[in-house]
Each structure stands twice: as structure tokens, then as C-alpha cells.
Amino acid sequence: MKKFFLLAAAVSVAFTSCVKNESLTGKAASSNEITFEVAKYKATSRAEVAFPTDQSFGAYSYYENALTPGTHSMYIDNAEIVYKVVDGNGYWAAKGETYFWPTQGHLDFISYAPYNDDATSPAVPKISDSDVQQTLKYDGFKVDAANPVDLLYSDKAMQQTANTVNYGFTGVPTLFHHALAKLNILVKAFRLDNRNESPDAVTTWSVTIHSITLNSIYDEGSLTMTTSNVHDAGATTVQWSNTITSVPYNVWSNTSSTTSKAWTCDQVLTTTARHYGAGTADVAQNYFILPQALAVGVQSITINYSITTNAPGGQTATVDYEATKYFSDFPAVPAWEQGKNITYTIEIDPAGDEIHFAPAVVDWENIDGVIQF
């Protein structure tokens, strides 16, 4: 069996929804209409990702009257927020109706994406009213292995009383985070000849990987997050925290439901790592998965590949291989955590072990004969 290595790296990514820096002036929106500032996050350790202007997100808002502090009522109930352009100026606002800022009190906002007009869908986070909207939960969400989506939830924007200006946009600060994790798979050959070891008797190899399959991946679960309300800090935003404490990872509580995902593409490897299936419609890149701890003997990866060996004497042989490894065997990434962008590099050494010889000579077989005269 040839040697098959799996290298992993995880990058923490806070989804920092951003849009082009265009000013909002003129008649684009009424000064008192509620608009949304889909924020751009500039921390150097985090990636900037643009929220597509051809997509939409959902928003909830809760009103607190200054005369009755601590009491909140629904003000915006799962409105679809879209990108609008008026007189050449772009802004984010409700699609079907126009919402205006109240003349007293304040509003708290919680947003999510992608938008779903069915608020009972597991893809829409449920917000608890019993604790003044301090709990956000995805309940019984199941990842579609064939068409996974990027679930997003925003920080809670609190005590908002008017549109504010940041990053060239005017509106409610709306900073999204990823609820799921995502995988990327790169493939490469460790070497394609043995010139360094044997310059006078060169063997070359051609390595083709045919398919990659993820096995026994948990695909259904729930996520509960909480936050603390800040009622004395003026207009601000607060983050959500995972309530799971049973494991030291930022993952979902999963059911026993598992799925598999296969990518099929005859990709000839080079010694440079490339995305598997690059250039095809179904590439092993940015594949969204349920955040989960990697359990011993559960989640695994299977690869099918072939190696053609061109020996120094001119002989050629092609052999097919199938290999499976468990992700738990690679402790560099002990869990697929929420908001993490995990990249695995599959590295195949076509040489395997050099052929050695173990010489021995079968001893003579003694046969005795008698010759009589």
C-alpha cells in the first residue's frame, strides 16, 4: 500500500458582512426610515467577506418604551432586508414595507441569513422572549449534504434610536457570524520521481485521484447561544456565546443522524497542493458542515486513486488503491468548530517503500542411496 498522509489546518473566520463603500445621500432613503449597516470588520486576524448584494437576510426588532423600561414588544417580525439602489445610491432596508424609527424609546435588532419567509423553519433561529431576547437557538437543523447553506446570525444591536454611519453606509449595525463550519480539501503528490535518491536509475510515477468521500459526518443538531443585555451603554452591539460546556469546543449538540458526501473527479496530481475538483461545478471547497467534535472511529475520509509506475527498465504498471482514514487520528484539528474554515491536504507518496530483498538459499536436500554389486 502506498503512503497516504492527511494534513490539516483550521482558520478562525468571523463572517464580516461587508458591502461596497458607497455613500448614502440624497433621496436614497428617508432619514427616519430604518436601514441596515451590514458592517465591515477590519481586525487583521479575520478575513473580510462581502455580503452579496443580490441576496437578502431576515431581521427581527423589539421595541422598548422609555416609559415602561424592561418591557419589549415586537416591532419588526422577520422582515426581508434587501439591497436597494435609488438615484445611484445603495442601502439595505426592508423589502416589502417601510419601517420608521419610533420617536421615543429604542429598538433592539437581531438578524440572520439566508432569509426564509417561514419563521418555523429550522434554518431560522428562534429568539426567546421569556428572557428579553437573550437566547438564540437553532433547533433540529439538518445540513443538506447535496446543497449546504451558510447559516449566519448577527450580533445583537441594542438601544438603537436612529441610523448611524460607519463604513460608508447608514443604518443598524449588522455584523454576521457563521453558525456552521466549512471544509476544504487539497490534494498533492509527495513526489513524482526518485531523482534525488537514485539519479542513475530514475523511476517516475503518475498519480490520479478519482474520488474523495466523507463518511459518517453528523448532519443534524441544535445550537443554543445566549448574550447579556446592556441597558446602560447607549447604542451598542453584543455577541452571542455557545452554551455547550460538555466539550471544550465551539460545536453543536448533534443527533445520531449522519451523512456522506462524495466528490468524483479524475485529477492528476502534481507536487503542488490544489483543490480537489478545481474547475468543476462540484469542487471540494467551502463545503459547509455541522460543527462537531471528531469522535474516535466515526468521521472518516476515503480516497480512491491509481498510481502508474514507470520503472528504469521501461516497464510500466498501473495499480488502483482505496484508503480510509479517521479524522480523529489527526489531532491538529480535534473538532470542526463553529466559524472555522478547515483545510485538509491529502498527500500521496507514490513510492511507498523501496523494494528491498531478503536473500536466503534453500538448503540441499540430502538423499542417501545404496549401490550394491
Image (cartoon, helix red, strand yellow):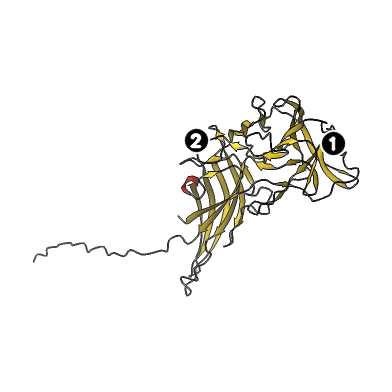
Q: Is label 2 in a helix, a strand or a loop?
A: loop
Viewport quadrant of the C terminus: bottom left
- Picture coordinates of residue 351, whole percent (x, y): 47, 62
Viewport quadrant of the N terminus: bottom left
- In three-dimensional space, the C-alpha distance between marks 1 and 2, rounded to whole angstroms, equals 44 Å
- The relative height of residue 212 versus residue 66 in the rendered view (above or below) is below
Foreground label between 1 and 2: 1
Residue for badge 2: 246
Q: Residues within 10 Å of mark 1 (few under 14, many from 20)?
A: some
Q: Which residue sits at x=76%, y=32%?
A: 106
Mark number, residue 272 = none
- Between residues 69 and 296, which one lies in front from this camera angle? 69
Q: Is residue 35 left or right of residue 307?
A: right
The amino acid type of the residue labelled 1 equals Glu
- Asked whether residue 269 is in view, the answer is yes
Q: Quadrant of residue 150?
A: top right
**Precedes in sequence: disc 1 or disc 2:** 1
Residue for badge 1: 33
Q: Is residue 345 left or right of residue 167?
A: left
Q: Quadrant of residue 72?
A: top right
